[in-house]
Image (cartoon, helix red, strand yellow):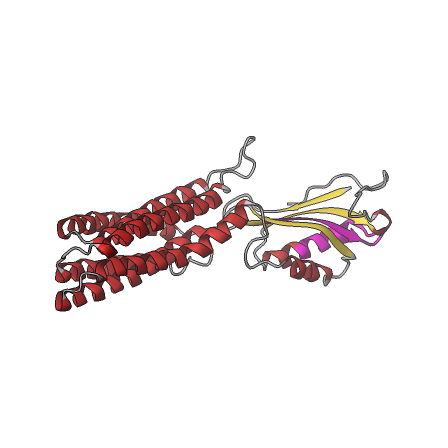
Amino acid sequence: MTHSHAHTHEPNSSSSKVGKGLLIGITLNLIFVVVEAGTGFWQDSLSLLADAGHNLFDVASLALALLAFRLAKVKPNAKFTYGYRKSTILVALLNAVILLIAIGGIGFEAFQRIWDPQPIEGGVIAIVAGVGILVNGFTAFLFIKEKDKDLNIKGAYLHMAADAIVSLGVVIAGLLIMWTDWYLLDPIISFVIMIVILISTWSLLKDSLVLTLDGVPKGINLNEVKNAGLNISGVMDLHHIHIWAISTTQNALTAHLVVKNGTPLSDTEIIKDELKQKFSSVNIQHCTFEIEAIKEHCSEKDCKTKEDTAPEIHHH
């Protein structure tokens, strides 16, 4: 029985700009949360308080993303052979759950305000929300280049972009309140904020839950991966294929690789290298193959090989 391990233990190179971007985002948003919440209490504005609460959760999300970013760099050891890369997936799931809790709180308070609108200064609300557009828009810009490489960075980008749009809505509501004294707009815009958060959070929740359960990561199709492997010369069959996420940036695959009986070891190594390159192009960085000759081809029910198989070989 032969095993091939083609992988890299170091996390994908996320530039130091990601870590700096997270720190800058945390600082700016924390300052803005204090200002927005203070103004919200001063003006008794639910929309400002709702947006401040959402931004506070986003600060927590950014902090957790930064923690996951740091943990992903921890080297593997005898206890955690993949390091702490899996923590990035747990953080993504936790972020989604936290935001759903925030949605519930905003919705409860907004429902109460529908029946008892409070007079507020629309102009003040518009000014503070305008600052929010700048803060959230700039923070989202910090992650725009890395958003498709990491689920946590994508989550941060989506949240900041959504916040900028929400802040724009609060600006419009503030101006309308200033001109019309229609205070009912305050809880109404809170419901809009709640819907925007839900939409931006749902995909994050779904994707992170799939990864937590070791499902096939988004963007990877198992059948397409198998067919791509079968197109490589010398590959007779690929079965018992399993694909899962090691972290929010790295994916792994194990499979039984069938080659012709009597295939030289050197040719088998070439086949494995070609498979590794092929799968790397579809975002699978860690590949482990169990080699079988046709006469040893195992069944899906009972996978056994003959005793005269080659010794175990580890390929890095």
On the rendered structure, is 77 left or right of 225?
left
The answer to which image quadrant residue 134 occupies is: bottom left
Which residues are the magenta region?
Answer: 252-275
User: Residue 287, how many percent across, how many down?
Assistant: 64, 49
Position of the N terminus, as image quadrant, is top right
User: Residue 95, how many percent across, how many down?
Assistant: 40, 47
User: Residue 283, how many percent across, how many down?
Assistant: 56, 56
Task: Name the residue at 44% across, 40% down.
Answer: 71
Residue furthest toward the top? 79
On the rendered structure, is 288 left or right of 264?
left
Residue 226 or 196: which is nearer the viewer? 196
**In the rendered image, is residue 289 in sight?**
yes
**In the rendered image, is residue 24 in sight?**
no
The stretch drawn in magenta includes residue 147: no
Position of the C terminus, as image quadrant, is top right
User: Residue 125, how many percent across, how many down?
Assistant: 17, 59
Residue 215 or 279: which is nearer the viewer? 215
On the rendered structure, is 90 left or right of 308?
left
